[in-house]
Image: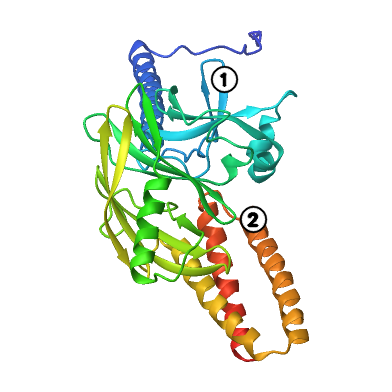
Amino acid sequence: MWQRVTAFPQRNCIVLPSRTAYDQEAMKLCAYILGMGCMLIAARFGGNRLNAAEPSVQPEPRWVEIGSEKVVIGRDSKSADGRNALAWTVDSSEPIDWSLLEKDADHFYEQYDVKEIWVVNIPDKKKVGTVGDKGGYVRPGSHRTLSVAWSPVENGRRFALAAYQWKWGTDTLLLLDVGADDCRSNQIGPVLDKAIEAQIKRGKPRLTGPFDSTYLLTGLPELGKKTGFSSPTTVGLPFVTKDREHDASIIEGILSLKLARAGEGPTASVVRIAPGPLPNDPFAESARLAKADRELNAIYSALLKRLSPSSQNTLRAEQRAWLEQRDRKADETVRNKSDSENARIVRDRVLRQLTEERSAELRKR
């Protein structure tokens, strides 16, 4: 007898693991998640340490906001410690294009005139004083010709020398006494001029002047031996003095000044005048330019004496054209300089090099 067998189709089924296998898989998953979390935390922590160790270099600010006023930090006017600087407010009835200061600082300086010049505390964003007033020291264009040298801080105060340079020499030389909340100033140029003229009369009594002196503040070290501040109250100041009529150098050297605080403001007394060639150091590019100018003047004058009147006129016209070309080249170099370079030092270096080349050319004639 045959037995009938019915074949049932197989069904898909899920096989549940045992309790032990389930626990093992769960532990593996937890370990994986925990490991990934630790790696992410370590990466984040390591990234923070890397960022802290290698901060990005921020560009030097070109202005600072003090209260409701935005003031331009004077070029090359900041103290070595970054605490103080001279800053100027803009004299303009039209809206000021502040983006121009970032894109083309030279153009900004040419487009806008100064209203006031302030002494500022940069970290605290605070005005501590005003340099002169609208009817006194400050004149149109003064922000383009200003140079400053700062002393070290002593008992919360410091001195600074500020000079407005002009075509024939230093127009105004100020001594500033700067504290945390105040600033006093005095003009000391006449005192120094008088001491230099007395030195000229002793050595060259036939010269009667008038004389024009240039005081070389740009790049003076905050602490120096021959030039710059040898102490918070003593400074060696390079100078060059010319005879205005003949535009010829008469004397150059270093003035040793003793600075003091008095009831009516800071004072400077000339302790010593050391005539002679100015030191050849990285801070004396202006001094080297003055020396090159002196040598060129001597060569040029000697050449003129050998020429006929018509040839003299030709040489004078040629020299004037060369001077204009030299200044244009220097201006172009300054416009193309990097932000890390000192504009005045760059300009003086180019002027000196071109002047030395001109001297070599005239020697061959």
31 left or right, relative to 11: left
Q: Which residue is mark 2?
A: 336
Give the residue at x 72% y 80%.
Answer: 315
Viewer-nearest residue: 325 or 334:
325
Tell whether 132 sits left or right of 45.
right
Give coordinates of residue 270: x percent, y percent: 29, 51
Q: Quadrant of the C terminus?
A: bottom right
Q: Which three-letter amino acid code belongs to the residue tagged 2? A: Asn
User: Upstream in the sequence, badge 2 or badge 1?
Assistant: 1
Which of the pair 271/6 is nearer the observer? Answer: 271
- The residue that mark 1 highlights is 69
For disc 2, the neighbor class at 10 Å (few under 14, some 14 to 19, many from 20) is few
Q: Is residue 276 visible?
A: no
Q: Going 55% across and 48% down the picture, which residue do you hit?
A: 339
User: Which residue shows up at 76% across the image and 81% down it?
Assistant: 314
Residue 5 in the image: x percent, y percent?
A: 64, 9
Residue type marked 1: Glu
Q: Residue 341: percent from the left, percent from the top? A: 51, 53
Q: Quadrant of residue 90?
A: top right
